[in-house]
Image (cartoon, helix red, strand yellow):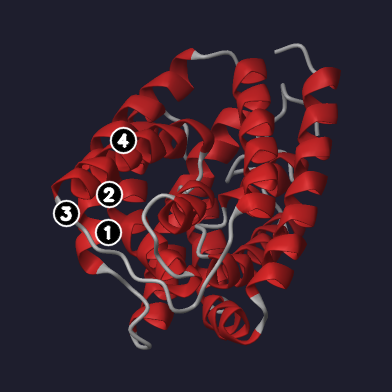
Amino acid sequence: MADDQPMTAAKRSWPGWLACAGIGLLAGFFSGLFGVGGGTVIVPLLTVAGFDMRKASGTSLAAIVPTAVAGVVSYAVNGWVDWLAAGLIVVGSVAGAQLGSKLLGSLPQRVVRWAFVAFVAAVVVSLFVVVTARDSHMAIDGWLGAGLVLLGLGVGVLSGLLGLGGGIVVVPMLILAFGASDLVAKGTSLAMMTPTAISGTVGNYRRGNVDLAAAAVVGLAACLTTFLGARVAAWVDPAIGNGLFAAFLAFVAVRMARDAMRRND
């Protein structure tokens, strides 16, 4: 669908609603599997479904709210959440999300698309250098606490700007820089997403960059598959999981780059 005819709630047909539900089911599985909000799935697929980039980013962030709640429950019941680390990240991310949503309304869509591509490409590289370990533990002192707040600030900006929950930054950073195990990193990432996503969604909604009806369908559908993704995360070897996710993100980056080169907005 052309950019000058974006999909709206008024125009959306049953196939459109079913597409939103399908996007949610896929995003929920990836959210539980990798400890992400699902924005890396939701944003590009919403653009394929007819959303412009701003609306896709804002709608994705709103859909992440219920997705992250379902995901963190799946991890918390197994003790795979560091609540102190999550709280410190949130301190920075809530403020950062407001800044990111403000940038989303002012930057050209072409800039947003290329920022998304560059961000995903960086994540693909990081997935091959992250060394995951199931028995690692975080020891949070004053310096690490300050680092977690700064991490949250950066994640919040990316969340508001790109419609991501921030998990694809938080998970590898918690493992590499803070010494968390892969499962605790994923659970903690999901725990910090809910307030971050709410903060960014409030800003995006004020600027007209959210389709709440579509976000509700995507988010509620995602809740149905997050538990399955979390169970698979516990079963699969971390190196295999990283490789699969990197391959998927590489596909997303190539598709979004091709889309950005075709459009001039």
Task: Name the amino acid, label 2.
Answer: Ile
Q: CA distance from mark 2 to mark 4?
A: 8 Å
Badge number at residue 141: 3
Give the SS element for disc 4. helix
Contact? badges 4 and 1 (CB < 8 Å): no
User: CA separation, marks 4 and 1?
Assistant: 13 Å
**Secondary structure beneath label 2:** helix
Across and down, in percent, residue 119 comes to 61, 34
Q: How many marks on residues?
A: 4
Quadrant of the snapshot with the N terminus: top right
**Which circle, 3 or 4, is nearer the viewer?**
3
* Mark closest to the chain's N terminus, 2 or 3: 2
* Real-space CA distance between mark 1 and mark 2, rounded to the nearest whole angstrom: 5 Å
Query: Pointer 1: what residue?
Result: 86
- Of callouts 3 and 1, the N-terminal one: 1
Kindly indicate whether the residue at mark 4 contacts the one at mark 3 (C-beta within 8 angstroms): no
Q: Which residue is mark 4?
A: 153
Lateral position of residue 10 relative to residue 65, left or right: right
Q: Is residue 217 above or below residue 172?
A: below
Q: Are marks 2 and 4 in contact (CB under 8 Å)?
A: no
| Above-or-below relation of 98 to 265 | below
The disc, 4 or 1, on the residue closer to the chain's N-terminal end is 1
The answer to whether 187 appears left or right of 255 in the picture is left
**Mark 1: few/some/many CA within 10 Å (<14, 14-19, 20+):** many
Q: Earlier in the sequence, mark 2 or mark 4?
A: 2
| Image point (73%, 71%), residue name | 240
Q: Give the label, 3 or 1, closer to the camera.
A: 3
Q: Name the residue at 28% across, 69% down.
A: 82
